[in-house]
Amino acid sequence: MFPSLVLVGYALVTNVCAPNAILGCEHWMISVKEVLVSPSLGLAHPVWIERLPWLCQGCTIRGVDADLYDFGFFSGRSSLESVQDNWSTLMGATGATSVVHGRQVHGTVIRAHETASAGLHMFPDCDGHVTASVGVLLAVTTADCVPIFLVDADRRAIAVLHAGWRGAAAGILEHGLLALREQSGSFPADLLMHLGPAICGDCYEVGAEVFKALALPIPLRPRPINLREILTEQAAKAGISLANITVSEHCTRCTESDLFSHRGGDRGRQVSYIGLRP
């Protein structure tokens, strides 16, 4: 159902970052620079392409053939017709017949999908999706928030979650792990996790309310915060091995990655998607 992805003219790039302040000096974060597969499929995890050929995964970029590739039904940037066309383009590029998405509200509701009929399915008020069914493409949209990809390679179970600071504070990751456990019997130790393109710690300056919500020391003035570091800490505490966690090098704001950024003034949305091939 999903066609094979082929990298053309891009090298596999991984490296180990310096220790981060959130996890402490004894921990290291493995960073990955996703590579462009095609304009319509966007950026994909190069290690997963190589090692998980049964997986279809990626994050779209903002332009295809000079047209805006906006997936935001609720952001107000593009017409409903053009957004629907973009979803259709993505479905055609991946070969998916079923795509599931939801109205994201920075909450912790996760939808489990056994099967889905053909077409795009919109669900009310949810920020994550899980499945172990072949051919069901799971999708969340972002424009600075963190897309979280979870994969149980042994059970062929997957999830994608939408995590802003409110979701991270409310426990979106923990709810996603529970949904995978209930649906497929996956334990955190079984999982691979990738934190996709999002705003980086240098660009994301926030106020005291965010630090308070995340149970961090409250600064006297607004300061930058790195959500992907915080989510890595949460994942490690939940039982996901640090060796199985990768973090995107792409920043929606400061790297030249052709991505939408809400902080940068964009109202468009890219989509992070994941599915199982036959």
Image: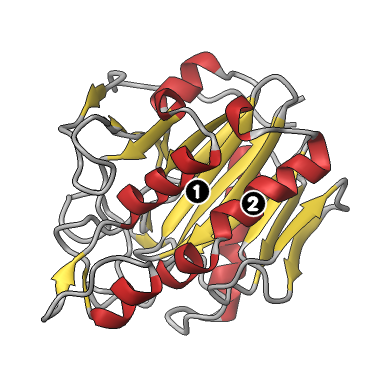
Q: Which mark is residue 148?
A: 1
Q: Position of residue 24 (x, y in %)?
A: 23, 40
* Residue at 47% over, 84% down: 76
> Closer to the camera: disc 2 or disc 1?
2
Kindly state the secondary structure of the residue where label 1 is placed: strand
Q: Is residue 23 above or below residue 27?
A: below
Task: Measure the alpha-carbon separation of dots 2 and 1.
Answer: 9 Å
User: For this view, does 59 lie left or right of residue 28?
Assistant: right
Residue 89 at least partly seen: no
User: For this view, does 63 lie left or right of residue 93?
Assistant: left
* Residue at 15% over, 57% down: 254
Q: Position of residue 256 (x, y in %)?
A: 18, 50
Quadrant of the rendered image containing residue 275? top right
Q: Residues within 10 Å of mark 1 (few under 14, many from 20)?
A: many
Q: Which mark is residue 176?
A: 2
- Judging depth in this view, the residue of 47 and 59 nearest the camera is 47
Kindly state the secondary structure of the residue where label 2 is placed: helix
* Residue at 64% over, 46% down: 177
Q: Earlier in the sequence, mark 2 or mark 1?
A: 1
- Quarter of the picture containing the N terminus is top right
Which amino acid is tagged 2? Gly
- Quarter of the picture containing the C terminus is top right
Q: Position of residue 124 (x, y in %)?
A: 73, 76
- Judging depth in this view, the residue of 266 and 232 nearest the camera is 232
Which amino acid is tagged 1? Ile
- Judging depth in this view, the residue of 170 and 107 nearest the camera is 170
Q: Which mark is residue 241?
A: none
